[in-house]
Image (cartoon, rainbow, N blue to C red):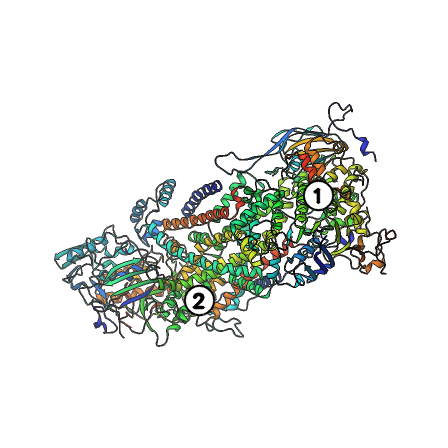
Amino acid sequence: MILPLVRRFGVLVASVVASSLVVFAFMQVLPGNPARVALGLNASEGAVERMTTQFGLDRPLPVQYWEWASGMLTLDPGIEYISKAAIGPQIADRLLITLWLVGLAMALAVAIAIPLGVWMAVRHRHADGVVLTAASQIGVAIPAFLAGIVLISIFAVRLRWVPSDGWVAPAEDPVLFAKSVVLPTISLALVQGSVLARYVRSAVLDVLREDYLRTARAKGLTPMQALWRHGSRNAAIPVVTVMGLQLATLLVGAVVIERVFVIPGLGSLLLDSVSDRELLTVQSIVMVLVVAVLVINFIVDALYLMIDPRLKTGAR
Amino acid sequence: MPACTRWAPIPHPGMGHAMTEPILKLTDVRREFRRPRTSLRTPPPVVRAVNGVNLEVAPGERLGIVGESGSGKSTLLRLLSGLDQPTSGQIEVQGRRVDGQSSRQLKWLRETMQLVFQDPMSSLDPRMRVRDIIAEPLVAAGMSAAGKREERVVTLLQSVGLPKDAIDRYPHQFSGGQRQRISVARALAPQPKILVADEPVSALDVSVRAQVLNLIDNVVEGFDLTLIFVSHDLSVVRHVCDRVAVMRRGEFVEVAPTEELFADPQHAYTKQLIAAIPTLSAALGGRTAAALADEVNQQAGGENRD
Amino acid sequence: MGAAVLSVQGLGVATTRTPLLADVSFTIDSGERVGLIGESGSGKSLTALAVMGLLSDGVRANGTVELAGHEGNLLERPEREMAKIRGSDMAMIFQEPMTALNPTMRVGAQVAEVMRIHGTEPSKAAAKSRAVELLDSVGLPDPANVARSYPHQLSGGQRQRIVAAIALANSPDLLICDEPTTALDVTVQALVLDLIVRQAQERDAALLFITHDLAVVATVCERVMVMYGGRIVEAGPVTEVFTDPRHHYTQGLLAASDLSMPDGSRRERRSLPTIAGSVPGAGHFPDGCVFRNRCEAATEACTEVPTWHDRGDGAGYACVHPLGADSSSGHGARDD
Amino acid sequence: NAGASTDGDSATGGSGSDALTVGLFAEPASLDFTTVDGAAIPQALLDNVYETLVTLDQEGNIVPALAKSYKVSDDGLTYTFQLQQDVVFSNGEDFTAADAVFSINQVKSDDWTISLKSQMDVVESAEATGDHELTVTLSEPSNAWLYSMTTRIGAMFDENGTENLAEEAIGTGPFVFDSWDRGNEIVLNRNDDYWGEEPYFNEVTLRYFNDGNAVNNAMLTGSIDLIGTVQAPESLAEFEGDDFQIIEGTTNGEIVLSFNNGRAPFDDLRVRQAARYAIDNQALMDTCWAGRGELIGSMVPPTDPWYEDRTGDYEFDTERAAALLEDADATGVDVALRLPSLPYAVACGTVVESMLEDAGFNVTVDELEFPAAWVETVFTAQDYDMSIVSHVEPRDLGNVFGNPDYYTAYGTPELQEILERADRGTVEEQTAAMQEAALMVSEDAAAEFLFLLPNLMVAEPGITGIPTNLIGESLELSNLARSE
Amino acid sequence: MTQPIEQEITRSRRRPINATLIVGAVLVGVIVATAAVSLVWTPQAPMRVLSTEAYQRPNAEFWLGTDRLRRDVFTQILLGARTTLLVGIVAVGVAALIGVPLGILAAMSAGWFGQLIMRSNDILLAFPALLLAIMFAAIYGGSTQVAMVAIGIATIPSFARVTRASALSVLRTEYVTAARAAGRGPVAIAVRHVLPNVASLVIVQASVAFAIAILAEAALAYLGLGTPTGQPSWGRMLYEAQSTLRSAPHLVLIPGIAIAWSVLGFNLLGDGLRDYLDPKLEDR
Ligand SMILES: Nc1ncnc2c1ncn2[C@@H]1O[C@H](COP(=O)(O)OP(=O)(O)OP(=O)(O)O)[C@@H](O)[C@H]1O
Ligand SMILES: Nc1ncnc2c1ncn2[C@@H]1O[C@H](COP(=O)(O)OP(=O)(O)OP(=O)(O)O)[C@@H](O)[C@H]1O
Ligand SMILES: [Mg+2]
Ligand SMILES: [Mg+2]
């Protein structure tokens, strides 16, 4: 079990390094001297030059890369051009918010998807299963931001149950936190939950066709018992992959929902930084997101190793 | 039917027969597979799928290879048909080297040796029409005139007992036995000298098995082929082949003319194999499962394992 | 031989569109070993699954299936009650030992589970130690170690022994084996066959043994039923059916399958007798006699479903033009 | 602070613990307006945290602020300011003439980098002629200079309070900067030591939004008390009725359909005129800004002293436009309309496109991200034919059209001469010259002046003291109060 | 050797055409038809501000009403179908044209080269479509072209993965071994055997990717990074209409339904094709 994990970890490290090069290279393509953009409309050449040297934008690229990359490692990628604020803590603050959102949305999605997916699979030949399956298809088809807009219109504006926007830290006021987070979470989870439910359905259907499930029933288990005791672990294998991919999608997809609900998460910071041409910030955020996705993939692989004993011994 | 007497048997030295040049010759052929490492301390496990095989096959001979699952039969076939490279050893077909050659250099081998596989489902490309399947070796051999190819395909279809109009159909429109016929037709297309069959009837029902065995018998006879026939079923090999090689854990434990092998098996493993075959006659004669198992255990001398 | 353990009457199985089994009737007594043979797609597994109540969704069974000790028709029982019977009073060994075991669960736990489900062992620990004993009794070396393994760490033969251990754990009255050795090497097959027969005998269980290998069925069973096209076309004691077949299908199978001479010596290499054509897919069998499109003796009369000629003791055949019918005197049917 | 309030009800100020949340659009990237351009920073901080010597009232008159009074010498070169006593910066330092000198010199130094700093070039020297007396000498007379002292250029800093301008603001204003939660809000607290009348609200939160819809929702759900600038006027209908008050005033923001006068086809007067004739301003304003706003016809808002109604200069006439195009041999000419990605520009751009095409232009619309991409392409590289921007700086006719290097590439010598004259002359001369200049840019069709951006606000019914017109750079919060 | 072969050979591939497939095909067909119609006819001049009232409800002259800028909604819906299809086709095209050959190449080249391809692929997988589109938009500005190329590039890995997995299983089949034994070279095997046999999975993947691309484009339009103003896009329409959701809900509803319709259509088509092309279900 250790060796495959070590091997996967090596791949993770290599991927992080490679993608940091990609991200860095990508940002060099951006037109416009960040110093000029930062200084605004009619800044003097002298001012632009001073800022260029101040931020070391005229140094050779490898030096700039090394500076940034080693900064990332120490969680201190530098300061912003315009506001001169340290980037690291900002990203950390915003990431925390996004993680809350994504975490809750994922939890809700899973909570919806698993019973729903199992139900759809077990009852796939019955009317209720077919109806649910169709409903989940529609859930997949609705853009998350549209769901958000409509939910706001109904539950915030019309019914006044919850606020339409803003973010309250859970430590600050748990009740307000819950209220402010419920709609964004639902908007995100609605789509992802539907997608996940469909994968759960097909994973369960696949498992239901397996011989060992028939063996389990021949032992005297009812279909649901058999599914629970023997199917869940096996069905989890493909579902875990999808959940990993979804977490990645959510992490970035939260951008849109953060916009709709005016939540100061990492996605909002990314968009703001893009429009302010805070390249270093953009670069660092992109890197954080990419690393997050890579780490999620690594965790998924590690979970595989735990779920599927066939991988531990290198068989298969 | 002169097949039984025509060929010069067994290339054992000292047999006294004037030996024709062997059409196929294997010298100490080995193939190892490295499994992925499972631990940092122990070296990666090595599977010796073929472990020092020597063999000579005379033209026109029908050689059977038997052995249990995983004994290396398929690996050996892949080696001698140039689809895989041996870790060491030499393989010669008609005196020409097969090992260490690039696929470009092996063009001649494709026209000399052809294969028939076990699974009638997966050995034919489901998206190709029978016409294209059978013509594939011809295309590969560079026969470019479509008309001539078509003519040949029709002839081949006839010789394996399929109607002309099968030419435009897809594999899934045929039964298992018919698919094996198509496989055989494809193998015959480049007019090979050697036919290599890897468990060609193991996946077939008894009634169909008989049909395919008859077909193989007929084409080997009719086209004057050398046959290498792999099976785990001793009774099939016994029916088809003149000589049998018993394979176990990558090695030939015994090679002998069929009747000799059955009448007087030398190696314990061969004995065990023969003893384990359930036959209708023996069963009707009162051999129970317990008796069968007893015999196997006896031959194995206690070294039995699954 | 004891009393009837399993009694199947007029069993039919069908999807909404296609009939798959029709009018299957047989009984098996305790301690009796009955073989069910036929080519692939003839309906052997469906019969077994129908008896076990394990048919997949979308396939329905009718007729009656009765198991000794249980009142009434099993086919009408709710799933919950069937679950109680399965694994305790009747058990099944499946064809593919590769896939019949849960790949993510240790095999010892899989064996122990069947005893816990039916409460045969009072505690988890007891079930575990019983499982190890069982593994020992099915001939697995170092059973304690095997119990801790995952299926993929075991060979095909070992896996099949585990499947057998699961089936035998609660000493069922009825054991159904669906081609238990098809995927195994001959040497291993011999040992597994021995195991099954021995264990069934020890428990005095009724055994329904499915295979397409005539030699295997002759080795294992006393009585055999020949199935084709979802119907039983012939049945009787092994020696009788295999030496003196009535149905053309049985005869065809016999001729095609035995490659050696009756005396066991090598058959001269000449054309083997064959059955023309191949088994049609479900729903594509002809009506009337299901075999008539492959049968040399078929006539207009075969368009009617042939009646079952009972030869007594569960023996009989369904053919309009039976082979050797003249020679059979004592038994046989004279109902036309 | 002598700014006029619309209601005289601010007497309640100074004691309550009431808080106010204002919804605003586009968060500043920094708090430092000395180096970072854009309207967002002065909007939040000027007159609230930072104060100027003089300021504008709602009618656009210059009135005293940190300076109790000021005197101008007859030659218009020397300004003497008497400063308020007992003014304290929020870091505890006293405000003295030395601070004022420091602040003015800072603008002239390299520490200021924004383009507006050039307005301070005219200052020759600033001296503390007493503890609370400041004397500023100009190198030449300039009417614009005192006016610019009402903007961020004139903000008064403490000598020791400029270390971390980007994240902290230390001023003398009625509010003290409390905190900035980036991406979310800026919080200001009442300055309990304020030298003037203390504001009513104990705490004012400026919440930032990215689109008009979200602000509206926040208002509708009560999570804000006031929308600083409505960005989606089409949605104002939702606020009509007794539950909300809608404030509609004017701003300095002339929405200009700017032409690139420096290159074909808009270097041709006839083409420019054609474009002006092609636009039906009333219909345009009705469509893209829900009829809110004011038609101006030139680069002068009605709150400027030299305002004249120029809306009749190019009365909508598609035929005439087509004929002019024909005349210039430019029918079907391809023009690139490069819009900043701002709500008014995007909405108006679509309408403008249709109107121009009706007259025979072949318009390609590009939407450029604002600010970065737009500044890069249109403003700096001047790679555009037309754009739509609201020029919000006060009295910016000279800025926008007086400089041939500016992105409008206009700045004819004639206009420059007029502008110079205006800056130097007396009040009357200035007014006359500016009217001349406005006439010139209009007649010469230097640009098409679509309409004046309205100051649209929505507030809870009880909020008073809301500035109706937004003609300075700031959003004054100190007069706001809640009456219930 | 005469055999009663006829009756068996004629057993043709009768695949059950499932309801999902039909519904999906119909939904997609409507979108395609709509886009096709818009090429030759639109009820009003494309994207033109008309001299009529804004915010009209659906009526006889303006079938789906008018928007805030007095443009005909029905015309925009027709034209938007074109954009939607274009985005899908280009995005999926980019992804498939690069991803499929890469997947096949990776499957066929054992050893470090195949590993390299798949590892690079995994790295690309770490850049979700939206992230890539935001990065691209930062460089080239937001536009339909940028959006679809970004989405396309971000979709490459999924195609490469699916193709590789499926190509690996094709390469393990005996018919590929047979082709090699017949002397077929790697290119012929890739083109004649692997490609046709992975095609069905690729088609399924494509229709699902199509749906994802449509959603991504809508999200980008919402963020102001997709289709710019003045060009027809359902996502853009939604974005522009949201501020009048309560006073003119049809302006949100109509493009919303159009998006959901097409996403649903392509998803169902994908599901239906999966069942239809699934070899496991053949000959039932
Ligand atoms: N590509 C490979 N990589 C690793 N091991 C392999 C590979 N091919 C074959 N082996 C191993 O080599 C051994 C021999 O395999 P081979 O397929 O030749 O057996 P076989 O006799 O044909 O068995 P069967 O009767 O099941 O077809 C097996 O243990 C197998 O696992
Ligand atoms: N769920 C099902 N739906 C439709 N047809 C089915 C179903 N299950 C089995 N069949 C069909 O019923 C026929 C009999 O199947 P069955 O599995 O009983 O055959 P078998 O005799 O056990 O064959 P084998 O030797 O291959 O196991 C086959 O043609 C099969 O395709
Ligand atoms: Mg093999
Ligand atoms: Mg079966």
Amino acid on which disc 2 is placed: Leu
Q: Is residue D205 visible?
A: yes
Residue nearer the viewer, A189 or C68? C68
Which label is found at residue A151?
Answer: 2
In-image side of C225 versus E140 (left or right) = right
Position of residue B123 measured from the top left corner of the image (x, y, whole percent)? 68, 44
Position of residue D269 measured from the top left corner of the image (x, y, whole percent)? 39, 62
Amino acid on which disc 1 is placed: Ala
Question: How many residues crowd around disc 1 within 10 Å: few (fewer than 14), some, or many (20 or more)?
Answer: many
Protein chain holding label 2: A
- Ligand 3 picture quarter: top right
Position of residue C334 measured from the top left corner of the image (x, y, whole percent)? 85, 59
Position of residue D340 measured from the top left corner of the image (x, y, whole percent)? 40, 59
Element type at mark 2: helix
User: Which residue does the image show at 22% across and 70% down from the upper left?
Assistant: D13
Element type at mark 1: helix
**Residue, disc 1:** B289
